[in-house]
């Protein structure tokens, strides 16, 4: 299959959410927009992206257009809370927000905080890369996978599935991220609770797991040898570390791997609306998409080529959540998880 067809088939309707309604017309990147953005001089970007990637994207945008990026990087749940707190205090500081929990877009839209916007660059992308009503763009996506340090674990001894993590030999050797901080882990926890049941997490909690916050933390802790095995972690961070020579091996369990859409939105109350639109154009540009992939993220852009050593999507059983389900169940998922793990 052609890559574009493969991605569309693999994604199904999972990233699109509810049935597609009327979308705004795609907007072209014009010299007038660039000039207007430069007059504003800056863009405030709140993002759940890996800090390394977010920093590189920010610097590349600044170098290209001469604007300043006010980068605020945190976990998706923290980004969500911060925006809510700011708006409750009548503070409109954020221009563009990027979240690994597209369920956030459901409540943001219900509060009338989003400005539908479709950059013309995504016209050739699969429909699933554009949220309902054009409210968000899936400018990248990743997965949540287990993995291990190849210097500490032999391939024959390594876990091959989610349930293999429950083997007593891994007790005290696992590191895991928390859904209360990470949108990607909220996504993964919901998907795995449906696939494996909460009994899986109850058993995992007895394994002496090192609990960290962001989905980017387990790959780094495992690569550094702090723990031999990561129970979950962001594939994009993991692939970036592997590309840099880290002794990290990813596992794509046969039970399925949670797929995580990373959606970017234009805020209706953006203090720098032209710079915000320009930044949205940049996020989906060929330049930025190539930068994303170079740092381990997957792309819906049919013109992007993935490294040959990546496991193809066609060989991975993907697990999806609808944005509406994430919005409705996220808090219950976080509460149940905290009850089980005691954190």
Image (cartoon, helix red, strand yellow):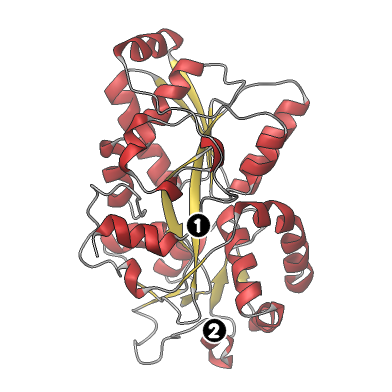
The image quarter in which residue 329 lies: bottom right
Q: Is residue 234 above or below residue 283?
A: below
User: Is residue 343 at all visible to an observer of this figure?
Assistant: no
Task: Pick whichever, 179 or 303, lies toward us.
Answer: 303
Check residue 13 in the rendering and tell me which mark sits there, or answer none.
1
Image coordinates of residue 72 in percent, x first then y, are: 53, 34
Horizontal arrangement in the rendering, residue 195 relative to residue 36 (left or right): right
Question: Which sits in the foreground, 5 or 292?
Answer: 5
In the rendered image, is residue 239 in sight?
yes
Residue hosting label 2: 165
Question: x, y percentage for residue 202?
Answer: 71, 80
Q: Quadrant of residue 154?
A: bottom left
SS under mark 2: helix
69 versus 203 height, above or below = above
Mark 1 residue element: loop
Q: Position of residue 134 (x, y in %)?
A: 51, 36
Viewer-proximal residue among 141 and 81? 141
């Amino acid at each position: 299959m052609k890559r574009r067809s493969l991605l569309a088939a693999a994604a199904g309707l999972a990233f699109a959410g509810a049935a597609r309604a009327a979308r705004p017309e795609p907007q072209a990147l014009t010299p007038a927009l660039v000039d207007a953005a430069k007059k504003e001089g800056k863009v405030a970007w709140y993002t759940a992206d890996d800090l390394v990637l977010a920093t590189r994207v920010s610097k590349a945008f600044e170098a290209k257009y001469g604007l300043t990026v006010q980068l605020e990087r945190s976990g998706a749940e923290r980004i969500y809370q911060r925006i809510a707190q700011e708006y409750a205090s009548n503070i409109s500081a954020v221009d563009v927000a990027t979240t690994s929990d597209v369920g956030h877009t459901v409540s943001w839209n219900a509060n009338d905080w989003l400005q539908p916007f479709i950059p013309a660059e995504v016209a050739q992308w699969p429909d699933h890369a554009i949220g309902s009503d054009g409210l968000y763009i899936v400018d990248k996506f990743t997965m949540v996978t287990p993995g291990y340090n190849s210097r500490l674990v032999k391939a024959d001894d390594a876990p091959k599935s989610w349930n293999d993590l429950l083997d007593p030999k891994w007790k005290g050797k696992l590191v895991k991220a928390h859904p209360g901080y990470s949108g990607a882990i909220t996504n993964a926890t919901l998907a795995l609770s449906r696939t494996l049941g909460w009994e899986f997490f109850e058993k995992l909690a007895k394994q002496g797991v090192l609990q960290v916050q962001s989905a980017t933390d387990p790959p780094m802790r495992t690569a550094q040898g702090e723990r031999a095995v990561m129970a979950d972690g962001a594939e994009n961070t993991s692939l970036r570390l592997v590309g840099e020579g880290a002794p990290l091996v990813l596992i794509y369990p046969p039970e399925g791997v949670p797929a995580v859409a990373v959606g970017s939105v234009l805020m209706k109350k953006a203090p720098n609306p032209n710079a915000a639109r320009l930044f949205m154009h940049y996020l989906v540009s060929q330049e930025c998409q190539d930068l994303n992939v170079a740092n381990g993220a997957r792309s819906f852009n049919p013109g992007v080529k993935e490294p040959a050593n990546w496991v193809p999507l066609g060989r991975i059983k993907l697990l999806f959540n609808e944005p509406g389900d994430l919005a409705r169940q996220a808090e219950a998922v976080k509460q149940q998880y905290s009850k089980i793990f005691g954190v």
